[in-house]
Amino acid sequence: MIYARIAGTGSYLPGEPVSNDDLVARGIETSDEWIVGRTGIRARHLAPQGMVTSDLARVASQHALEAAGCKPQDIDLIVVATSTPDYIFPSTATLLQSKLGITNGCAAFDLQAVCSGFVYALTVAEKFIRSGSHKRALVVGAEVFSRILDWSDRGTCVLFGDGAGAVVLEASDLPGILGSALHADGSHHPILCVPGSVAAGQVVGDPFLRMDGQAVFKFAVRVLGEVAHEVLADAGVGVQDVDWLIPHQANIRILQATAKRLGVPDDKVIATVAAHGNTSAASVPLALDLGIRDGRIQRGQKLLLEGVGGGFTWGAALIHY
Ligand code: UT7
């Protein structure tokens, strides 16, 4: 039997942290007290002008390749989860392939599931590896969400940040991904969307992120609980056997409510939202890489990754790291 295991991880955050007070100084009508109280966010990173998603993805990928002990040419599949691609086309994955100097002609494509993107991408790459068609995949979540924020809308612009996380997923004789589940319900698309497009050289509709925060909050807490139970039950693993819960990092209150519903203590949750804000598809691999590099996550442990985002989409993956 062929399985897929995480061989190495990497991440990248652009520039210096931008604090809540920095946002106030830039003229946004908000306060550190409001943002921390409602979301737990204290800072975020914002990509400088000219830096695009594939640039963030490149650095995160190089760190993941080093951690996995492999060369760029060893990669035979690239999947990039992003909602903020460099271009309409070609895909950010092909641009990343070029920036990494991968010339072996490997398959490369983007995957769009907003904040669930990384969990979707990991699950898709796992299927390629388990089928035997591919041996070593680079799976990336990378975003420049700052480019799709309406900086005059204080209800959304304070919540998001830019960043990238990457994983090298490789074929293995031993199980690495123990189970996963992906879901979507498109009927909820109006509560979190960027309802715009480009046609005839013009932006059609609205090119900024729009959100009904309270509706998203309730939906996220419900589905993150449901999908976690689903994946654990399918794998025959008890919640007490999960070493680390690594949920999408949108709001500390969502993370805490999800952990409480599952019966996971707060000290088993990897939380980066205070320092990174919500980096959409990058949030889960960023948190994963941080937990590995600071020594909390150890080989042999069980990790439960979860994502929820626009679409609506949601999913979870149980990993034997
Ligand atoms: O990846 C998924 C992405 N999104 C999420 O996970 C977001 C989920 N939702 C949330 O995290 C919360 O709903 C928010 C943090 C977005 C908002 O918290 P809330 O408790 O739902 O606040 P609200 O939208 O009901 O707004 C409450 C008040 C309003 O003032 P009034 O009408 O009560 O006078 C807002 O105008 O807070 C005001 N407000 C702000 N005040 C200071 C909204 N944004 C801000 C702000 N600073 N940045």
Image (cartoon, rainbow, N blue to C red):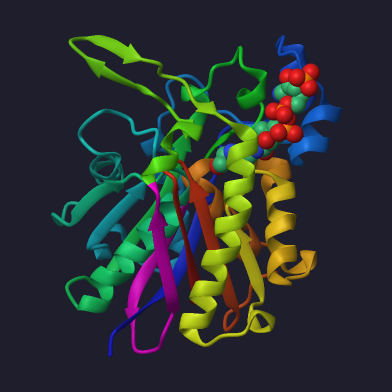
Residue 259 is left or right of residue 222, and the answer is right
Q: How many marks?
A: 0
The x, y position of residue 196, in whole percent, is 35, 21
Residue 264 higher or lower than 150, as above or below? below
Quadrant assignment, res 84: top left
Is there any visible trace of residue 199 in the rendered image?
A: yes
Is residue 173 within the magenta segment?
A: yes
- Considering every residue shown, the one lying at the far right of the view is 33
Q: Give left or right: position of 141 versus 284.
A: left
- Dominant SS type (magenta): strand
Among the 4 quarters of the image, the one containing residue 31: top right
* Foreground of the two, 182 or 3: 182
Q: Residue at x 30, y 53 (%)?
A: 79
Q: Nearer the viewer, residue 259 or 70?
A: 259
* On screen, residue 207 above or below 74: above
**In x, y percent, where is residue 131?**
21, 77
Q: Residue at x 73, y 71 (%)?
A: 264
Q: Position of residue 270 (x, y in %)?
A: 68, 60
**Quarter holding ligand 1:** top right
Q: Which residues are magenta?
A: 164-185
| Viewport quadrant of the N terminus | bottom left
The residue lying at 23 percent from left, 43 percent from top is 94
